[in-house]
Amino acid sequence: MAFIQIDDLRKSYGEHEVLKGINLEVDRHQVVTLIGASGSGKSTLLRCLNALDPIDNGQIRVDDDVVSGPGVDLNKLRRKVGMVFQSFNLFPHLTVEENIVTGPIKLLKQSREKARARAVELLERVNLGHRAKYYPDQLSGGQQQRVAIVRAIAMEPEALLLDEITSALDPELVAEVLDILRDLATEGMTMILATHEMQFAKEVSNLVVFLEQGRLLEAGPPAQIFGSPTQERTRAFLKQIIEAGRL
């Protein structure tokens, strides 16, 4: 049984059907990259996986628990599956340290001492130990995004969803965030990420999924998707990426 299983997932906003019957399995320790043009459904898929958006049809299971539909224990789901957004979503009135320890204290019932020790450890890992007492607006975009990742990791999730987390960053700040994801992949963190960073996807993914207008058009290992895609639309998309110098 796959760790995350998506069966015939459909989602509409009004008359606009955004996801049109998505089927996908993700095993533990896999890194799955969602690629495709803007509007293809990548972000919506991630939001449905974290129950931020209700689904219209189909089913999502995490560790064999149904996590879609009414009656879902959202706290249990979000302890198991963390999410990082492109807009950081840090609490502006809290210091970096407080942003990180609040969740573990309130939801995981950790002592403040344990939560703080873990926060310091994680911040040191991403070279931000000296910024623990800073506020988000005193940090660069790349630093804020690293804090957002640390905040998600501090909740001890079994999987991470990452939604275009480098798209709001200046190019020189992208590398420092991607380095953290490489480390997490090496450590075996299960990740599903939507990204336009094709070279990164090629390097770290176990599975690359190409979405087109709400449909899963093609999925396979990076060597296949980037080297010999079977679908004409995938080939056309990657041709544009290559011509733009992004692969």
Image: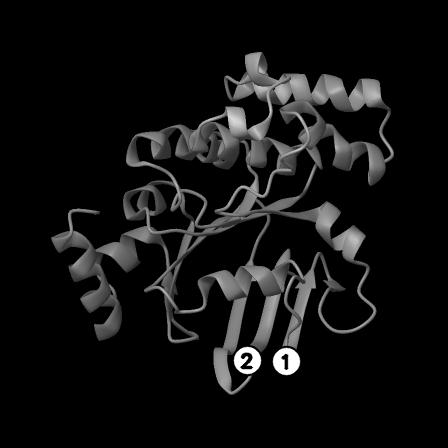
Q: Residue at x 49, y 37 (%)?
A: 185
Q: Amino acid at mark 1?
A: Asp
Q: Nearer the viewer, residue 222 or 181?
A: 181
Task: Using the image, tell me which numbered label, if any, was put on residue 32.
Answer: none
Toward the viewer: 213 or 24?
213
Residue 6 to residue 112: above or below:
below
Give the amino acid type for the residue marked by disc 2 in the picture.
Answer: Ser
- Disc 1 is placed on an element classified as loop
- Image coordinates of residue 28 in percent, x first then y, are 60, 48
Which residue has dot 1 on it?
56
Q: Look at discs 2 and 1 and give the one toward the viewer.
A: 2
Q: In terms of secondary structure, where does tag 2 sit?
A: strand
Residue count near mark 1 (Cα–Cα under 10 Å), binned few <14, some 14–19, many ≥20: some
- Report the residue that reaches farthest toward the bottom: 15
Q: Earlier in the sequence, mark 2 or mark 1?
A: 2
Q: Is residue 176 left or right of residue 12?
A: left
Q: Residue at x 77, y 57 (%)?
A: 74
The quarter of the picture where residue 51 lies is bottom right
Residue farthest along the top direction in this orientation: 130
- Count numbered badges in the picture: 2
Residue 138 falls left or right of residue 201: right
Q: Find residue 7 and report its horizontal and vertical position in percent.
A: 59, 74
Q: How is the image coloured?
A: one colour
Cα–Cα span, label 2 and label 1: 7 Å
Residue 166's place in the image compared with 131, above or below, is: below
